[in-house]
Amino acid sequence: MEHKSDFLIIGSGVAGLLFALKVADFGSVCLVTKKKASESNTNYAQGGIASVFDNLDSFDQHIKDTLSSGNGLCNREVVERVVKEGPDRIRELIDLGVTFNVKDTPLSDRDGVNLDLGREGGHSHNRIVHSQDMTGREVEKVLLDRLKKHDQIMLFENHIAVDLITYSTRMKRGHVTTTHEDFCCGAYALDRENSRVKTFNAKITLLATGGTGKVYLYTSNPDIATGDGIAMGYRAGARVANLEFVQFHPTCLYHPDAKNFLISEAVRGEGGQLVDASGKPFMEKYDPQKDLACRDVVARAIDTELKKSGDQSVFLDISHKASTFIKGRFPNLYENCKKFGFDMTRDPVPVVPAAHYMCGGVVTDMNGQTDIQCLFAVGETACTGLHGANRLASNSLLEALVYADAAAGQAITELKTRDFLMPHISSWDEVGTTDSDEVVMVTQNWDEIRRFMWSYVGIVRSDKRLARARRRAEIILDEIEKYYWDFKVTGDLIELRNLATVADLIIKCAMHRKESRGLHYNIEYPSLDDARWQKDTVLRRPFVG
């Protein structure tokens, strides 16, 4: 089955949804998402959106904080653009119906919207726009409701993209023979409900598939975060960059049944303290900003404390604040912690770091355009130059909003002015494949990847650990490649293939960088080396003639 449209969007987080709403008045849209449309990283974003609204704050300060967090690798032009466009994008969300928390006091914001602004690690001012402690869910709900009412948008839930289709690969099942002047003309996607691969032919394709957290054993991300867009973009010939910079969120709830449950950085922003098992605060030993240090510093501090003590977790304590304040500011966190037997108003909550955010991704320009013509990337899938070596808290949703707007503007311009070639695309070829009789290969390799990535390519790395991970990744990639061509594709196989590809790319980037910077810490090169390494780590799939 083939679907034709002007725009194909792969992913249903805030970036994909906002892009869809902006382009839908100019052409037909197909939006493909691997589970329910609401199941995205956006939906799990608790903290908020960083933006300058307070009269005491300034764009210059937000820019400075972002550059400081990025540790020498941010693109200043990108940072300035994202920061300065932030308030307009927030106002746009408000106009669309998103409800953010406001102050009870008279107006004091520069734009007169009177937003209640929180503070998180690395920020010099209160500038986190939020909706209680579930900001992402509020934004996702409003955008998705509007999308479902738009008659130019066709939504395909439970469809997982298999691979991008470029002009040079359109006649063969995934056997890539590509040049670096290729252009994208859609994607193949598996309908998970009837196990049928469909062809989506589009003039412009957007990758908005989110992050890579599931490549690690412990993560704050939902199960969908398998790096699909990064893997597909790389296989199609697009450059990827800075994949060694994996952000580990310092505070995920430590409990055997608390899968992926994040304790927002906003808790520390409101006065919460990290303490050891005896109740003693420890962050003052690691950074002058103590509990409000940047995430890379806090995650390494916790990792160090756990290695020294042998404990399973440290603790986050905000019980010194009024009970009414905690319940009002963090209603979702309070209720969920209660489910696992922890009362935030009375007790410290056990926490550990977990893989959280990918600062690298598919390389794009200022308008979200990749190396491949007609292919855009936004959100966590993309490497725009904003985050550098470490993302500043709550800059992720901000980046998604600004770049969805920029990419939509560029895509609309291209649709109006470009002479598109819509080539014939062969249907998915399953000739010679059979149903799998060895599903254990998928589950075994999935588990092995996540374990060796956690053990060897985690918060603290070494050349020896990275070499071990590389050897295992090569063996698994070879197994998956042989398996992939012999059996019919399934959702689990597609995700495993992408997960293995992304793991391999992370390892390669980490092995290449012989220094410690931001989120990449190698015990054999503990210092910053600006003279040699103040540059992006860029990978590109070799040309196949």
Image (cartoon, rainbow, N blue to C red):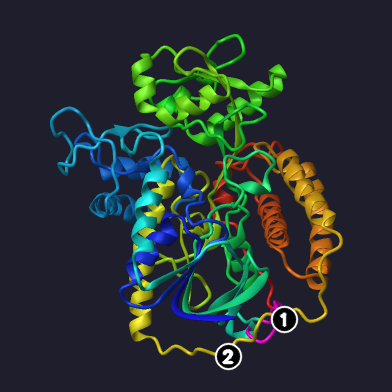
Mark 2: give few (<14), some (14-19) or many (20+) Cα within 10 Å.
few
Disc count in the image?
Answer: 2
What label does residue 209 carry, if any?
A: none
Residue range of the region highlighted in magenta in the rendering: 170-177
**Amino acid at the residue labelled 2:** His
Residue 467 horizontal/vertical position (percent): 79, 48
Q: Residue 176 magenta-drawn?
A: yes
Q: Main secondary structure of the magenta part?
A: loop
Could you say which is closer to the camera, residue 437 or residue 274? 437
Identify the residue position indicated by label 2 in the image: 424
Residue 99's place in the image compared with 2, above or below, is: above
The residue at which mark 1 appears reads as 429
Quarter residue 226 falls in: bottom right
The residue shown at (54%, 47%) is 530
Left/right of residue 468 with respect to residue 54 in the rendered view: right
Q: Secondary structure at mark 1?
A: loop
| Residue 55 image offset from top left, x and y in percent | 19, 36
In the rendered image, residue 537 lying in the magenta stretch gets the answer no
